[in-house]
Image (tube, helix red, strand yellow):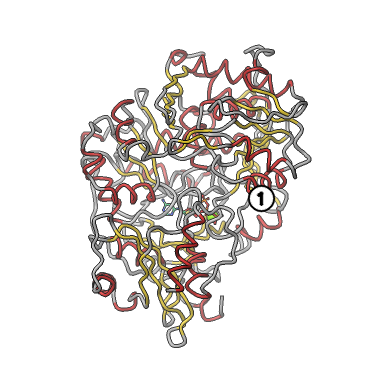
Amino acid sequence: MSKSDTQKPSIENLLHENRKFKPQKKSFSHYFLQDMSHYLKLYKNSIKNPESFWTRMASEHLDFFKKWKKVFAWKDCKAQWFLGATLNVSYNCLDRHVQSDRKNKAALIWEGEPGETRTLTYLQLSLEVAKCANMLKGIGLHKGDKIAIYMPLIPEAVIAMLACTRIGVVHTVVFGGFSSSSLRDRILDSNCKALITADGGFRKGSAVKMKEMADEALKETPSIKNVIVVKRTHEKVKMFPKRDIWWHELAENYSDSCVAEQLAAEHPLFILYTSGTTGKPKGLMHTTAGYLLGVTLTTKYLFDIKETDIFWCTADVGWVTGHSYLVYGPLSCGATVFMYEGAPIYPEPDRFWKMIAKHKVTILYTAPTAIRSFIRLGKELPKKHDLSSLRLLGTVGEPINPEAWIWYYEVIGNKKCPIVDTWWQTETGAVMIAPFSGVTPTKPGSATLPMFGIEPIILNKDGTPAKKKDGGFLCIKKPWPYMARTIYGDHERYKKTYWQEIEGVYFTGDGARQDKDGYFWIMGRVDDVINVSGHRLGTMEIESAAVEHPLVAECAVVGRPDAIKGQGIVAFITLKKSANINPMLKEEIAKFIIKQIGALARPDEIRFSDSLPKTRSGKIMRRLLRELATTGDIKGDTTTLEDFSVLEKLREKDED
Ligand code: ATP
Ligand code: MG
């Protein structure tokens, strides 16, 4: 960053979104919060007296074996919370419900891609988890050992995660769609002793050969001694004697009773790699008490979980969203989780909506990328199904463009479900900024206000406060219990990336601004900011303007060097299925963008593309597009890229 950059407001604000949605009286039954003034009172209190706030929350919401002696300590950018306490995550997610009225309540309702279903009650899930924990002990794993989980979205993935937590084994879940080299790198980086995988999983009608992929990875991972394999697809796989064991065969040897280990509050819970949107993935380490407190509180309060809810978080367990809101958060709250194995549009493009109607899902939590792809397919598909069970809609992963927000609200939520746009990161462990459903008035495109105990601030690069409305670097003022404690094996990188970029505060890497109501608007990644004639523009606002055009489905903008302006804007656009490309369409879209946000945002070039390069978790990888627009080629880290053919196609276009 040049010197002049540091003196300016970091990012300029272009988007003027004025729509505001008041919570509807009908859904205004938040069991904890009465209204906004109640929120503000509690929020202020949580910031003023954080230690007493977190103490009260931990006592009220979690079961500990032993209480803490000290709430918080901080040294060398390493936080410790609830020192001296012991607890167990699986105990909180299972045993305490089994001991209550929830014993026979469904904990997990699962549907496989071929259509079969399976329901596990809290009691059944706890027995399976205990058995699996005994299996892990049986193959020689001890407290503190690391294990990789590379599985399709089947109940055994959840069972395996909870089993690890029962005995203090640290899991690294690797997204099942990753290739062997990504799996290998993660196993090597986190030094795992064992792997749990499956013969395969079903995706888009075919059996994905996961075991084969794992075998390839394991050629170069000497630390792995055993592999437990779930039989899912029944395809023939090679089993290596001594190393590989079938889950169902191993299970026969063990009992389904296993006492939960009493683990220290700071015992490592899991290592998880970021999505790799902006660079090489980082292995974030989360610990027991603080993480569990974060996911429990946010699930309870932001989603306002009720006893009758069926909560569907569509993320894979391989991402933090899957960890926090498919597994740990809802189960800690005693909710019913719905989980689906396969592709959203298989065998028919309305599969999602069909399942919501069938299982009477009440809360849907998905990503803007999914919403945009549904918009592209048209509203007739969801309209075919009865979605009246839905009462709340969540979104996460990327800024949601106001246009997509409105579609989600009107078409899926039938204008009666609050939209809960949740801003957070792998590093933050759980949601940081989001509306309290049914309480916080919402604005399309804004994640609204912070969670209790979280103090976001917007700064210039030199650490001075940025002008709120102009925007700057989104930072968090103080440590909070559910943040990652380190990057596994590289605490220096952790310090440098998060705590030293702007001295003394947590640096999120995202740009944001705050409006007059104090609402936060995420403007895009700091790494993606485009500098046009000295004006620093976030990607989100230009993209949001573009997707408001009736024919545009998705847009990614990047900067490329420009001799006069410093940087010029290149917009990569995918059109809606119904769009006819006429020779004037590019000019029309450019004018449309200018009309909404000003001449400064005029794209120097618009490129149409069938799809955009995305991470496996569905986020647009602007850094690859930037490289392509600048040099015509791509050399950056592409290990988390979803579909390599997209790059090939984009390159071909470049040569046209
Ligand atoms: P990497 O850190 O490897 O580049 P990543 O940042 O995509 O990958 P995640 O931790 O999965 O990895 O994603 C967190 C990021 O996702 C946030 O920093 C933010 O940029 C974006 N994000 C998540 N939720 C929202 C949201 N509701 N609104 C805007 N942006 C969001
Ligand atoms: Mg990140």
Where ligand 2 lies, by quadrant?
bottom right
In the drawing, does residue 277 fall left or right of residue 402?
right
Q: Is residue 297 left or right of residue 3?
A: left
Q: Identify the residue shown where x is 75% and y is 45%.
A: 220
Q: Position of residue 170 (x, y in %)?
A: 67, 35
Choose top left, top right, bottom left or bottom right for residue 385. Answer: top left
Q: Quadrant of residue 165?
A: top right
**Residue 283 higher or lower than 623, as above or below:** above
Q: Position of residue 331 (x, y in %)?
A: 48, 27
Give how far across and how far down residue 467 sits, in percent: 41, 69
Is residue 9 at least partly visible in the picture? no
Q: Which quadrant would the N terminus be assigned to in this image? A: bottom right
Q: Is residue 479 above or below residue 471?
A: above
The vertical placement of 377 against 572, above or below, is above
Q: Residues within 10 Å of mark 1 (few under 14, many from 20)?
A: many
Q: Secondary structure at mark 1?
A: strand
Answer with left or right where residue 239 lies relative to residue 94. right
Residue 118: image quadrant is: top left
Residue at which label 1 appears = 487
Mark yes or no: residue 423 visible: yes
Quadrant in the picture for the C terminus: bottom left
Q: Which sits in the foreground, 54 or 407? A: 407
Residue 535 vs residue 578, the one in the foreground: 578
- Residue type, mark 1 in image: Ile
Q: Residue at x 48, y 66 (%)?
A: 625
